[in-house]
Amino acid sequence: MKKVCAMAGTIFNPEKPNQSIKELKEAGIQGILFDFGLIVSPAGILADRVSEESKWKPNQTRKYYKAVISQFQEHALLPSIARLPFVDVNLNLNEKTGYSYVDLNRLVTQIDADCVKACEEMDCHDIIVQPLSAGLKQEELWEANKVFYLNLAAVCSNEDTKILLTNQCRSHNGHLLRGVCSDGETAAEWVDALNRACGMQRFGFCLDVGNCNICGQNMQRMASELNSRIQAVILTENDGQNMARQLPFTNAYGRRSTMDWLSVIRGLRDILFDGYLILETVDTTVAFSPLLQPYLMPVYKEMLDYFDLQINIEKDLKKFDRVALFGAGNMCRNYMKCYGRKYPPLFTCDNNPKLWDTEFEGLMVKNPEELKNLPEGSGVIICNIFYREIRAQLEQMGIVNIGYFNDEYMPSFYTDRLKRNTDDAEDADYNEG
Amino acid sequence: MAGGRKMLEIGVQTKNVIEDKDLLKGFEKLKKAGFTCCDFSLNAYPLNGKTYVLGEKNFFDQTVSELEAFFKPYKEGAERAGITVNQMHMPYPVYMPQAAYEINDYLWNQAAPKSMEICAFFGCRYIVVHGFKLAYYLGSEEQEWEQTERFLVSLAPMAKEMGITMCIENLYESIGGHIVEGPGCDVRRAVERIDRMNDRYHAEVLGFCFDTGHANLVGIDFESFITALGHRLKVLHIHDNDGRSDLHQIPFTFTRTRENKPSTDWEGFVRGLRNIRFDKVLSFETAPVITAFPKELKEEALALIAKIGKYFKDEI
């Protein structure tokens, strides 16, 4: 899994990225999504083209972003994935702007072709390219995009370069609806048709969960329909109405995120996703004072690791020859429901002595001391939310093979939760899974 | 009729319009407003809240004869006023994963089949059925559909015999107040499942109810969804909302920008129905509109809904 942060919201000044790159690296973030749109915007170019001084003039843009890329090179943070400039779905051209959608789409094509070359020059081989949609009727979309994407493919000289289509919304009088490539099966058909036309696997897909969330889509189903075509996933959150790019879990109501992360994680697990995880959080980052923004970088690193953990939850379970569990509550119950057959534990244990020598979900509940007698190569999987305390306890016992289980995003759930009658109130919270 | 095509009719749900104390007056009000059909709100008998708790005497404990006797005045009222009961809504939910076995058994084995009997009693061809909401528990939409299909299969022989088409509807779920798609939102799968079931029973036992409000909440493209449904689209629930909450308001009510153009894609809705040469009933599910307007304006509100129906009819 390649874990990166989007440039917007982490590189605060693309022209002078040094400090930002330093903070990212200190936080342990090893990669970024290079956003050409921060440097060159088609709409900006069209609006500004009359000015001789404009840095947005087509023959200036290449020089401009080459200068930015060279600064990344100096810091050994060359991006391996990039996103090309695109047109905002809310853009509304009228007579006053003085240019047409045809002008705009033509310019996007020109700029994107140039950016593809720039990507290959910096050894960046995964390139996210939004479909064209501005000013196009429904029945025109496929043909227009086929020409657009095949033109870009023709520019590629490296066989490793992959162009990733991505899902969009469209605006209907200000209300965001499902747009181009928002239907998984149709998007898959597009990718396959383009690859057939190219005679090679040049195209793939980048799933933008933020755009899916705007339209309340079933992301598990979308992932399954696109399957191995998904090479990258943009992890971001919004309120389901506006195209914000927020840190996951921050758009909350009623003590929970309003985003269907369960659907995302189930979907990515189902397809054994192992591509790019791209965290995009510009609205969260910029909402914070610049004095506080550097403190967000470590959180972003942990967030990426968290999603890696959830998507690859079975990795922790299969890294040991045999496992024993720690915890005899709801989390253990969920483990046994979803993974007990595939990764059968030897037993479980709990700090509540009343549970020792009882059976729970087909497992014997033992004194944690029994963990000292585990066969070599075995691990202890913590099935309790008090991870840090239990880890400390296990380390004190000399146990080193420790893994974590988490039941927040299970393949399936019980319709009820286990309720225990616990007389030892002071231990109740610590002991319950 | 031009080209042999049936005329579109206009209907509305009976909830908040037809009152038990004077049924004929309620149906006559519908007729006067411009409707020729109605969507009988069987789901109001009993109220939703009561389906969660089984009491000593529950509505569907009555025998079929008792239920027919209960609804006879409604049937007669509609007939006398010249209103056709085009569709009705089975009480929902039809399954509650966290409820006791007895409640789900009652819903499945009493409420559901007796609803079908009532539908047949009214001479009504279509009954809307909500799919089960189980994807969270079971793990996928496919597994959820398996359970819904089991339920529909239990009613299918009855549907075939009575000449009733059960119509699955596009629904939604809520995640922390944010509306996301629920059962019935994938049109390709809906088409495949409807065709499979109808092939199995050699009859149109299953169809689709397109709910514009629910579709609007999850950004579904009306035109492409309706076009893909084709002849499987049997009934409609037409209403509007702000894209955030299921408000069941009058079409064209909501805007989002200074240009104040409708934020719901009614043009796409009309194009979709035109594409499939829809020839059934433009039925509005707008009960909350009736309660929102003051008493003095309710009839005008109802008439406006019917006029919008006529507008759609003329456009289609």
Image (cartoon, grey):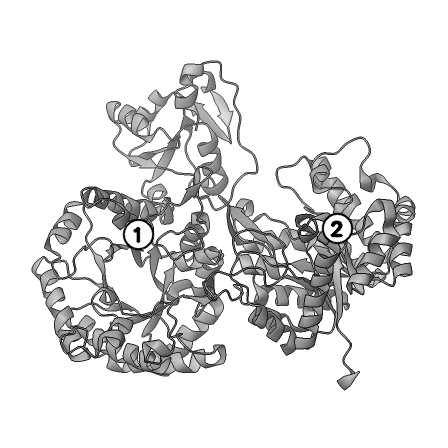
Quarter in which the N terminus of chain A is drawn? bottom left
The 10 Å Cα crowd at callout 2, few under 14, some 14 to 19, many 20 or more, is some
Q: CA distance from mark 2 to mark 1?
A: 44 Å
Q: Which SS class for mark 2?
A: loop
What amino acid type is highlighted by mark number 2?
Lys
**Is label 1 in a helix, a strand or a loop?**
helix
**Looking at the image, which residue is at 35% across and 77% down?**
A96
Q: Is residue A90 left or right of residue B136?
A: left
Residue A196 shows in the view = no
| Residue placed under numbered mark 2 in the picture | B15
Residue drawn at (71%, 70%) of the image: B310
The image shows residue A117 at horizontal and vertical percentages of: 19, 76
Horizontal arrangement in the rendering, residue A37 relative to residue B92 (left or right): left
- In the current view of this chain or complex, which residue is farthest to the bottom? B3
Judging from the image, mark 2 belongs to the subunit labelled: B
Say which residue label 1 marks.
A283
Label number found at residue B199? none
Q: Residue at image x 84%, y 62%?
A: B83
Near-viewer residue (B85 or A199): B85
Q: Residue furthest left?
A: A74
Residue at the spot 14% in from the left edge and 78% down from the top edge? A52
In the image, is A158 to the left or to the right of B144?
left
Please state the chain letter of the residue tagged with numbered disc 1 in the rendered image: A
Determine if residue A244 is in view.
yes
| Residue A136 x, y percent position in the rendering | 43, 78
